[in-house]
Amino acid sequence: MPDYLQIALRALISYIFLLLLTRLMGKREISQLTFFDYCVGITIGSITSIMSTETSTGWYNILPALIVFGLLQIITSYLSMKSKVFRQIMEGKQNVLIRNGRVLEKNMLKSRINTDELLSKLRQKNAFKIADVETAILETDGKFSVQLKSNKQPITPYMMNIKTQYNGLPALVIEEGKVSGENLKNMKLTRSWLMSKLAEQGIYDISNVMLAQVDTSGNLYMDLYNDSDNKPNKSQSKELILAKLEKIKTDLNTYSLDTDNEDAKKLYKECEASTKVIINQFKKYMNQQS
Amino acid sequence: MTIYSKLNSTLNTLDGVLADFKEIQLETSDNEIKKKFYSMIKLTDDIINKLSVRLECIQKEESQYKEK
């Protein structure tokens, strides 16, 4: 077969092998790269390109090099998991450069970091004053971690003794027009609940919804495909408003019956009466419109 | 669901209705209609305020209950 076709085929094969290999190697290799990992990455890339273009030998002769490098990475990361000593040999140790607010010159010498670099790294972590820094560590992947002194850290509700409402991971319940049953189940919600929430906004067709996300407080955010559809036509929304008002009236009635508190009962009954007035006024308005 | 979350949900619906009223009032050019909605809006706002106060009470009670 002609050369260019042969190389195209080899390139395809190399691409597939590279993909298989990297999927096997997993995400960890990409996130926490020591300098060594980085070099191995480049090497694997190199081998793949040679596998595609070096026609003096078959691709099957170069493939072993690719497999060996990939396998070794997998094996060493597995061994690093099991043995701390092995891990230190492969990755080195983190180096504490600032402890208790004091710069450790000996450690800086060990990592060959000069003061300019130190200050620059601190600034990148938003620490412009060394006086604000409690701890600074040079990690094995070359990145800096900075811990600010406790009185320089931003205030959290915990510090102010403020109770917060639970806020967990939101779930994407509709994606590209399709409902995700699993995500709904994870939030302990049902399809019928979702449909009624959508109906509240005047949406009756799920395929029109591009995204819908629910948070742990039960709030629904949705985005439609046709953005002009976000405003349902006026006559439909009037019925909706009336339906909402009727529901509010019923809810208030239920609350008044459920509570034992006399003041609360009175409050709910008053609100229910007010709601009745609003409903009558709104009905008059609706009759005049049609 | 607790009474807190039910009342919260009712309040959210009320907020929605209030917004709908205001929108209709804004879009209409008929002054008679504008006047009609003025009273509906005031009543709705009143209910929202009363229920919000009650909701805060419930929240305090429920957090005390949780602490026990």
Image (cartoon, rainbow, N blue to C red):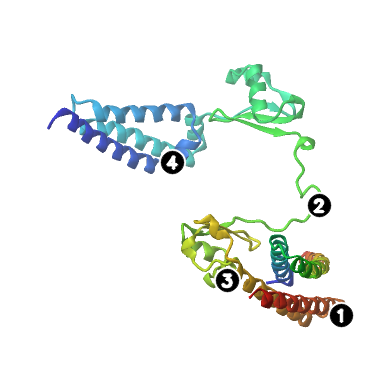
Label 4's element? helix
Q: Chain of mark 2?
A: A
Instruction: Judge by depth and name the residue closer to the eye, A67 or A186.
Output: A186
Q: Is residue A124 left or right of residue B7?
A: left
Alpha carbon of mark 2 to alpha carbon of mark 1: how far?
Answer: 32 Å
Picture residue at 16% right of the left edge, 28% below the top:
A3
The residue carrying pointer 4 sits among few (fewer than 14), some (14 to 19) or many (20 or more) residues within 10 Å by Cα, namely few
Mark 1 and mark 3, same subunit? yes
Q: In the rendered image, which quarter contains the N terminus of chain B?
A: bottom right
Q: Chain of mark 4?
A: A
Q: Amino acid at mark 1?
A: Glu
Instruction: Judge by depth and name the residue closer to the eye, A98 or B10.
Output: B10
Give the quadrant of residue B41. Answer: bottom right
Residue carrying label 3: A196
Residue carrying label 1: A262
Residue carrying label 2: A161
- Given contact means CB atoms under 8 Å apart, are the residues at marks 3 and 4 in contact? no
